[in-house]
Amino acid sequence: MADATASKPETWTRWVALSMAIMAVMAGVITLYMGKFSGKAVMLQGKITNQWGYYQAKSIKQHTYEMQRQQLELATLERGATWTEEIRSNYTAAVAYSKKMLGKYEKEKDEIKADGEKMEKQRDDAQARGGKLSLSLIFAQIAIMLSSVTLITKKKPLWFCGMALMLVSLWYVGVAFGVL
């Protein structure tokens, strides 16, 4: 009889230990993915910063051509009547080239802006997923802690609370991956 009662708590504590091991593995996987998304967000932020710097460079070049076009048009208005046909032709060609370059830079800026906004959405998504996974990790760690206290105190309700918190942790994982 003494052996039967002694083995019953031992069996129960084995289940607690097994559940803790499973929770620890899940916490490790959660940590891995949390790091993946956090790292992705940081890398994308660097790319976004470069993208908007590139956009600004194109804007400066575009502004330079706009100023050149305005100066050429003003010169044409001011002195154009006295020019020879060759000078007028050169000025007209320079104005046309400036307008062409303005259009080119506007198109390039639109593409750069679209790429930058796309990367910003990816970064925001990675940050949101990383945030949800960090909440998941917190709940998993608390679940592991409660389960370990269960082994010390022999209080089953703590283990059940730990299991419930692990379910909350898994719920956050599902939300982070868009399953829930």
Image (cartoon, rainbow, N blue to C red):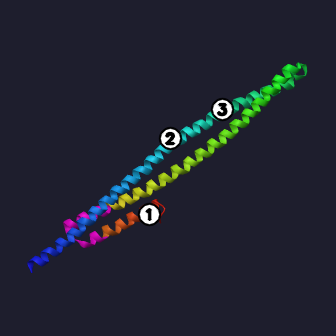
Query: How many labels sit on residues?
Result: 3
Instruction: State the residue at coordinates (70%, 32%).
Output: 63
Helix, strand, or loop for circle 2? helix
Mark positioned earlier in the residue sequence (1 or 3): 3
- Answer left or right for 87 relative to 145: right
Q: Residues within 10 Å of mark 2 (few under 14, many from 20)?
A: few
Q: Which residue is at 33% across, 58% downward?
A: 27
Q: Residue furthest bottom?
A: 1
In the image, what residue type sits under mark 2?
A: Gly
Looking at the image, is 69 positioned above or below residue 156? above
Residue stretch rendered in magenta on the structure: 142-160
Mark 1 residue element = helix
Q: State which quarter of the image contains the N terminus.
A: bottom left
Q: Marks 2 and 3, how far apart in space?
A: 21 Å
Image location of residue 42, percent across then percent down: 46, 44
Which of the labelled discs sits on residue 60, or is there none? 3
Q: Earlier in the sequence, mark 2 or mark 3?
A: 2
Residue 46, disc: 2
Q: Amino acid at mark 1?
A: Gly
Residue type beneath disc 3: Ile
Across and down, in percent, residue 17 comes to: 23, 65
Mark 1 to mark 3: distance in Å? 46 Å
Image position of 158 (left or right of 137)? left
Picture quadrant of residue 71: top right
Mark 1–mark 2 Cα distance, whole angstroms, equals 28 Å
Q: Nearer the viewer, mark 1 or mark 3?
A: 1
Magenta stretch prevailing secondary structure: helix
Counting residues from the N terminus, which is met first, the one under dot 1 or under dot 2?
A: 2
Q: Which residue is mark 1?
A: 174
Task: State the image quarter where residue 156 is shown.
Answer: bottom left
Tell whether position 82 is magenta.
Answer: no
* Residue at x-position 65% and y-position 32%: 60
